[in-house]
């Protein structure tokens, strides 16, 4: 019992980071993490498998976030394509991505792509674990990642051949 | 165009390709600079995301997100639910009227235990807040005082802790058990080092008996007393000696309601 709490505690920073990236709002993010932890801790007796605590917590967090979006009817998932296709201003340094642009770009991704790319690129989770958290087959995860990356490149004004732009 | 699927290239970019397959991809990239550039672009995206959001994972974790605290809190809630269920069974057994009057007899712990627990809990929840630490700011202390006095049905002056180095941040109203003083007022003070203490006040308990108690709970020190007019719990995480000095100042001002009023008006 105690060491499940320790394992949960070890995951809190990652959960906060992921929630912050999803919501872009410190209060909403921490509320989400708190809900997630309360749910997890109140059910920890029913759940035991070792080593999967992280995936289990992320699953709860993702579900809570989806529910909260549904509840507030904020349809982050239905975003017009042209919002993504709008090219941003070029990054100041060739090949480098301006952070502000990336912050805006990640916002424009459909939720399913945002969830996936953040699990892999930000959290560094193995593909299999990320697919398990999102309850999708590996192939679906890979195609979401591919679409997310393509959309991010368009939105960060970093076109397909960045090496050409480095030539002065 | 490429003998490697984009999934494998992505796995390479994410460092998730098995070691023995990496060399083949590396050779392929050396021969195909445009694909190599693509992979670098993906990696820059990941870097940008980590730079943007990584720091959120390095911030100190607020108390409300500590698993042990949450576990303790859930346990307490569960115990309360169980307590009420048990009380209901007893009430039915004894008959409603008799049961109602006998109810205090079934309280295993004195009210002070609950009040201290509530005060510490409220302290931990609200000192962690920045924008929503209080409902009414201390700058409006006259309104705060009259509002909370009305709600608590007692005369509640805002203690002046300037000489202890604390200024009033503000206050809020909190729900409470009717049999244990009812609604509570929480006043929050802060010193120059941004350390916060809270003062948790309810109307007097039904027995109106004087009491005095120190407790250490969840890492916080609590100083509780009760008299015929109010109960008060001062909560903070300062060293014990400092907590005592502050608590004494609160005690002196709140037990003499008129003196406290004179101090701030």
Image (spheres, rainbow, N blue to C red):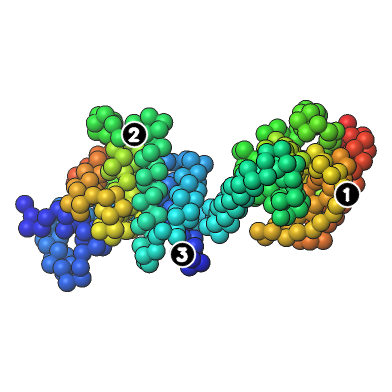
Q: Which residue is mark 2?
A: A76
Give the percent coordinates (x, y) of residue A168: 24, 47
Horizontal arrangement in the rendering, residue A54 relative to residue B11 (left or right): right
Q: Chain of mark 3?
A: A
In the picture, the disc for residue A4 is: 3
Horizontal arrangement in the rendering, residue B54 relative to residue B250 (left or right): left
| 3 or 2: mark nearer the eye | 3
Q: Is residue A88 above or below residue B18?
A: above
Give the percent coordinates (x, y) of residue B135: 67, 34
**Label 2 Cα neighbours within 10 Å, binned few <14 / some 14-19 / many ≥20:** some
Tell which of B190 and B136 is nearer to you. Answer: B136
| 1 or 3: mark nearer the eye | 1
Q: Residue at x 79, y 61 (%)?
A: B240
State the CA–CA distance, disc 1 to disc 3.
Answer: 43 Å
Give the percent coordinates (x, y) of residue A107: 35, 38
Q: Are marks 1 and 3 on the same chain?
A: no
**Label 3 Cα neighbours within 10 Å, binned few <14 / some 14-19 / many ≥20:** some
Q: Residue at x 25, y 44 (%)?
A: A148
Q: Are marks 1 and 2 on the same chain?
A: no
Judged from the image, the secondary structure of the residue bearing numbered disc 3 is helix
Judged from the image, the secondary structure of the residue bearing numbered disc 2 is loop
Q: Can residue B140 be seen in the rendering of this structure?
A: no
Tell which of B82 and A67 is nearer to you. Answer: B82
Q: Which residue is mark 1?
A: B210
In the picture, the disc for residue A14 is: none
Q: Chain of mark 1?
A: B
Q: Is residue A10 above or below residue A17?
A: below
Q: Residue at x 49, y 51 (%)?
A: A38
């Amino acid at each position: 019992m105690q060491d499940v709490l320790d394992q949960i505690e070890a995951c809190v920073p990652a959960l906060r980071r992921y929630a912050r990236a999803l919501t872009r709002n410190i209060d909403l993010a921490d509320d989400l993490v708190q809900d997630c932890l309360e749910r997890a801790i109140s059910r920890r007796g029913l759940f035991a498998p070792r080593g999967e605590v992280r995936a289990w917590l992320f699953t709860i967090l993702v579900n809570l976030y989806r529910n909260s979006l549904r509840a507030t009817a904020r349809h982050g998932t239905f975003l017009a394509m042209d919002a993504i296709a709008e090219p941003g201003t070029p990054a100041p340094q060739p090949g480098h991505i301006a952070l502000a642009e990336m912050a805006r770009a990640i916002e424009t991704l459909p939720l399913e792509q945002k969830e996936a790319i953040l699990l892999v690129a930000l959290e560094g989770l193995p593909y299999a674990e990320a697919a398990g958290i999102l309850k999708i087959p590996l192939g679906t995860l890979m195609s979401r990642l591919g679409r997310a990356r393509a959309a991010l490149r368009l939105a960060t004004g970093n076109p397909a051949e960045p090496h050409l732009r480095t030539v002065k | 165009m490429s003998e490697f699927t984009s999934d494998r290239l992505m796995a390479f970019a994410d460092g998730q390709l098995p070691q023995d397959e990496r060399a083949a991809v590396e050779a392929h990239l050396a021969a195909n600079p445009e694909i190599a550039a693509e992979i670098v672009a993906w990696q820059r995206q990941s870097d940008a995301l980590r730079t943007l959001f990584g720091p959120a994972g390095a911030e100190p974790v607020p108390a409300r997100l500590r698993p042990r605290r949450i576990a303790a809190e859930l346990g307490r809630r569960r115990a309360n639910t169980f307590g009420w269920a048990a009380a209901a069974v007893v009430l039915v057994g004894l008959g409603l009227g008799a049961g109602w009057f006998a109810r205090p007899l079934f309280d295993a712990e004195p009210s002070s235990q609950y009040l201290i627990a509530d005060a510490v809990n409220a302290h931990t929840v609200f000192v962690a807040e920045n924008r929503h630490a209080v409902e009414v700011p201390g700058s409006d202390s006259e309104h705060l005082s009259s509002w909370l006095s009305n709600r608590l049905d007692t005369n509640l002056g805002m203690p002046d802790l300037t000489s202890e180095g604390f200024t009033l941040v503000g206050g809020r109203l909190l729900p409470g058990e009717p049999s244990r003083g009812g609604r509570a007022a929480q006043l929050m003070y802060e010193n120059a080092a941004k350390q916060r203490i809270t003062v948790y006040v309810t109307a007097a308990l039904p027995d109106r008996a004087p009491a005095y108690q120190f407790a250490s709970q969840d890492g916080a020190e609590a100083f509780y007393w009760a008299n015929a007019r109010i109960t008060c719990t001062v909560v903070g995480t300062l060293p014990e000696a400092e907590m005592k000095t502050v608590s004494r100042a609160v005690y002196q001002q709140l037990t003499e309601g008129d003196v406290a009023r004179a101090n701030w008006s």
